Image (tube, rainbow, N blue to C red):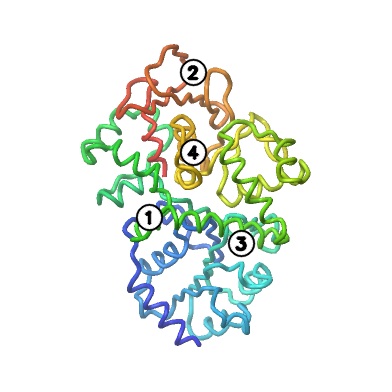
Amino acid sequence: MLDSLFRTHRYLLEHIEAPVRRALMDEINWHDRLIGIKGSRGVGKTTFLLQYAKEHFHPDDRRCLYINMNSFYFQGHSLVEFAGQFYRSGGQVLLIDQVFKQPEWSKSLHECYNTYPMLKIVFTGSSVMRLKDENPELNGICKSYNLRGFSFREYLNMTTGLKIRPYTLREIENRHERIAKEVTDKVGDVMKHFQAYLHHGYYPFFLEKTNFSENLLKVMNMMIEVDVLLLKQIELKYLDKIKRLFYLLAMGGTEAPNVSQLAADIQTSRATVMNYIKYLSDARLLNTVYRKDEMFPKKPARIMMHNTNLMYAVNPSRVKSEEMMETFFQNALWGRHDVKMGDRSCTFLVDNNLRFRILEGNVRRKATDVIYVRTDITSGSGLEIPLWLYGLLY
């Protein structure tokens, strides 16, 4: 079986198309022996594993092997058994896709870690998985990372062939005029690219010559049907309730949810609604925004779609400019920054000390401690910063 899997591995490496190098590739400490890559469906986890293999190993180098737990071979053979076979044949790096398809996968990874000390394992899993909270055997031995969809920077690099580097929040705040000029001098009409990104740029599969919206709808359904139901062990009979809840939240705008009304609408309890919202957020279908010093299980102050592409997929005729721009900003920052609900003077409070107001049009009242993020400008000045620049954070 090893020979067959190596043939598949070689074929995939020879035919992989990865037009842009993901920023996460340089953030991972590849010296660790057990590395978990989490992410929602469609963000490119498989391509990420293969890209790593291609960068570090020749396709014929049998020290590295990519396997997918969808293979029926693993219905009759344990992961520990296979890892031992690979290890004894000289294997050094085992790349495991969709590891959660293997029964008791976390215990198997723990056993592999202890049994094969010179073997490095890199595995992918759903964003719904709580690697350490729900799998204590991985504490202290597994380093986990989140692979997100394309940032606007990655989208620009892919569509223009440029190599724009990521910028920090502080760099954007202090040098936004120079950064905007450097990018626009190379890109040209950056707002045209930005509008395209908002519609279809977050998920790498937009490159496929198929209907993007239909593909995204399929992915969204799989997020609920597999990632939420399977991994959270929810009975199939509750699927319609979760889907209806998601639809109601998607149609309800970005305000605080009326949990009692939602519970009545899907005929369940308030506590169940709150849990379902948490699961949908874990699946990267929603983003929940809390007030300062609050978090789950408190009721979110706002509920937003996880990214703007989802807004167009659910109901393109309902997409409102203000909600879309706020969704983009929250999505651009949430992975590395703490984004909370703002007060009357600002839309968001970031990292407990930075105040941002997202707006379109000229600033009428200026507060010295608020950064005005303008949705309608290509370049700004002072405390007025173009929204699209926050897409360069990763």
Could you tell me which residue is drawn at 37 percent across and 44 percent down? 197
Where residue 268 sits: x, y (%)? 77, 46
In the depicted view, which residue is nearer to us: 202 or 110?
Answer: 202
Residue type at mark 1? Answer: Phe
In the depicted view, which residue is nearer to us: 365 or 95?
Answer: 365
Q: Which residue is mark 4?
A: 333
Is residue 56 positioned above or below 267 on the image?
A: below
Could you tell me which residue is drawn at 46 percent across and 32 percent down? 320
Eye-nearest disc, 3 or 2: 3
Q: Which residue is mark 3?
A: 226
Residue type at mark 4? Answer: Leu
Label 3 neighbour load within 10 Å: few <14, some 14-19, many 20+: some
Residues at marks 3 and 2, CA–CA distance in whole angstroms:
44 Å
Label 2 neighbour load within 10 Å: few <14, some 14-19, many 20+: few
Of labels 4 and 2, earlier in sequence is 4
Of labels 1 and 2, earlier in sequence is 1
Q: Which residue is mark 1?
A: 206
Is residue 212 positioned above or below 300 on the image?
A: below
Res. 369 mark: 2
Where residue 180 sits: x, y (%)? 29, 32
